[in-house]
Image (cartoon, rainbow, N blue to C red):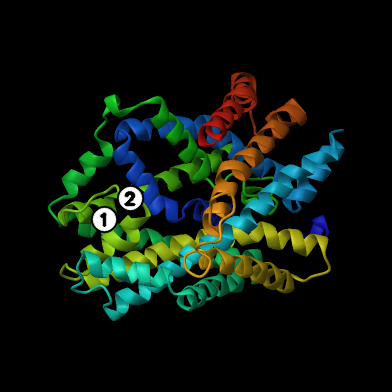
């Protein structure tokens, strides 16, 4: 595909919805809210926002800038920009590691998306109604132990992702986020409204927003920094790919601010939807993944209107998973479309099938291959660990170092509409603060 024919977002709002949809995923629905309550409430939120501003925002802007300047897939964009600026073509490794990370993450992410689809159907059929704790646990354990069921749900989820991405940037990605993101917010607000009727909304507010500065430790600060990095889909090639569809009229820093505000607001809303239900049922908020697939179904199965609330919640979860999954497949498809003779549809099918096949290996690690370990980890955990602890931070670090140290300083400032003190602040943060933040996250996670 030539640069002149490279697809473009139809509007700034379409891009904001797509970027926010990518950032809002399964982790936002439970992980962020849980971390807020467990790590000092409002104190954690303030630290998180500072980390987003000093680490997340600069890397997000850097990845968009690389994509927009290159107007191609992450690898080609890095090669072209390196060549034009007299730098080594080895910088292409930054783009390559991002695309690889997206491919690997989607393979196990789609398995979890399949769980969400399964639980959406379970809510409709009343599978959780009247179940006790052992019964709900048995449902989840039974799902994980059934390779055929996991394969069917994984296949259904990937088929949805492939269908959306194959339709292209305007009809596929934009069309999906224009529908899914408003629907996600509406479902979230309805669930928050229900939370207000439980009599435990005040408890949820206190859990999430009462500052406990005594709970703030160095570990909490690192956790906030890590969440700031991972929640924005950084280091996955996604934002470079999305940036390649951007016109020059979009203000990158202003748009990044908007995406970050929306992403954080949705994460906080998720907490206000989940925790009133958790507290009303005398449940523990610190369940991690079990909160979604064991604790909440128990609550939904034993409350008035629980079938409808459960359906709404798992639809919400599925929508969040889909908006992230389509963004994960996009860098892979863009790369294949531009570096092979394959059409958009063919590239999506080939990439989707390859992801699906690796996902089969991931889901079998819960049952048939549960004894097959690599470095002490099953396939699912190995994919998760390798991407989150190595590929993502190293790719994000490479992107910010390239933009801050290898591109012309004045041209970057001009493209970001910065001058004087603002330009100086950008260069200080992008050259020193953000890279050090990523290195701290990387070292602490090892």
| Numbered disc 1: secondary structure | helix
- Which image quarter is the N terminus in? bottom right
Kindly identify the residue that appears in the image at 62 percent across and 23 percent down: 432
**Label 1, residues with CA under 10 Å away: few <14, some 14-19, many ≥20:** many
Instruction: Return the residue at label 2.
Output: 269
Mark found first going from the N terminus, 2 or 1: 1
Q: Residue 192 carries which label?
A: 1
Kindly identify the residue that appears in the image at 37 percent across and 55 percent down: 289
Instruction: Looking at the picture, tell me which residue is in the foreground, 143 or 59.
Output: 143
Separation of disc 2 and disc 1 at Cα?
A: 7 Å
Relative vertical location of residue 255 with respect to residue 155 in this rendering, above or below: above
Kindly identify the residue that appears in the image at 31 percent across and 49 percent down: 271
Q: Where is residue 34 in the image (x, y as percent from the top left)?
A: 33, 45
Q: Is residue 248 left or right of residue 445?
A: right
Instruction: Looking at the picture, tell me which residue is in the foreground, 138 or 433.
Output: 138
- Which image quarter is the C terminus in? top right
Kindly identify the residue that appears in the image at 30 percent across and 34 percent down: 42
| Numbered disc 2: secondary structure | helix
Label 2 close to label 1 by CB (< 8 Å): yes
Q: Where is residue 123 in the image (x, y as percent from the top left)?
A: 30, 74
Q: In this view, does 388 lie to the left or right of 186?
A: right
């Amino acid at each position: 595909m030539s640069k002149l024919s490279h697809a473009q977002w139809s509007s700034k709002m379409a891009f904001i919805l797509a970027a926010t949809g990518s950032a809002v995923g399964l982790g936002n629905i439970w992980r962020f809210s849980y971390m807020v309550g467990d790590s000092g409430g409002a104190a954690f939120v303030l630290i998180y926002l500072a980390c987003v501003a000093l680490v997340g925002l600069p890397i997000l802007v850097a990845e968009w800038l690389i994509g927009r300047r290159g107007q191609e897939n992450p690898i080609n964009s890095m090669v072209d920009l390196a060549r034009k600026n007299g730098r080594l073509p080895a910088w292409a490794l930054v783009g390559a590691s991002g695309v690889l990370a997206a491919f690997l993450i989607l393979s196990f992410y789609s398995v979890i998306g399949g769980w969400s689809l399964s639980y959406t159907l379970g809510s409709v059929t009343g599978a959780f109604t009247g179940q006790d704790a052992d019964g709900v646990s048995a449902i989840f354990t039974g799902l994980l132990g059934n390779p055929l069921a996991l394969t069917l749900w994984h296949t259904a989820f990937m088929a949805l992702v492939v269908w959306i991405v194959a339709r292209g940037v305007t009809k596929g990605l934009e069309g999906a986020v224009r529908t899914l993101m408003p629907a996600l917010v509406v479902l979230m607000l309805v669930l928050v409204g229900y939370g207000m009727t439980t009599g435990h909304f005040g408890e949820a507010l206190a859990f999430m927003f009462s500052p406990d500065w005594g709970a703030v430790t160095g570990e909490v600060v690192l956790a906030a920094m890590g969440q700031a990095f991972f929640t924005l889909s950084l280091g996955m090639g996604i934002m470079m790919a999305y940036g390649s569809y951007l016109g020059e009229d979009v203000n990158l820093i202003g748009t990044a601010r908007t995406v970050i505000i929306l992403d954080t607001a949705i994460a906080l809303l998720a907490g206000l939807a989940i925790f009133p239900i958790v507290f009303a049922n005398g449940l523990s908020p610190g369940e991690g993944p079990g909160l979604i697939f064991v604790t909440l179904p128990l609550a939904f199965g034993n409350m008035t209107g629980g079938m409808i609330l459960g359906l709404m919640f798992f639809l919400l979860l599925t929508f969040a998973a889909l908006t992230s999954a389509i963004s994960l497949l996009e860098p892979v498809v863009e790369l294949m479309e531009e570096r092979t003779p394959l059409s958009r549809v063919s590239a999506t099918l080939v990439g989707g099938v390859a992801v699906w096949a690796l996902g089969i290996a991931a889901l079998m690690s819960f049952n048939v291959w549960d004894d097959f370990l690599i470095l002490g980890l099953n396939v699912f955990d190995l994919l998760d660990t390798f991407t989150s602890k190595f590929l993502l931070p190293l790719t994000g670090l490479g992107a910010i170092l390239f933009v801050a140290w290898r591109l012309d300083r004045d041209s970057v400032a001009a493209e970001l509409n910065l001058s004087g003190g603002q330009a100086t602040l950008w260069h200080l943060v992008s050259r020193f603060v953000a890279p050090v933040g990523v290195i701290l996250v990387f070292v602490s996670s090892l």
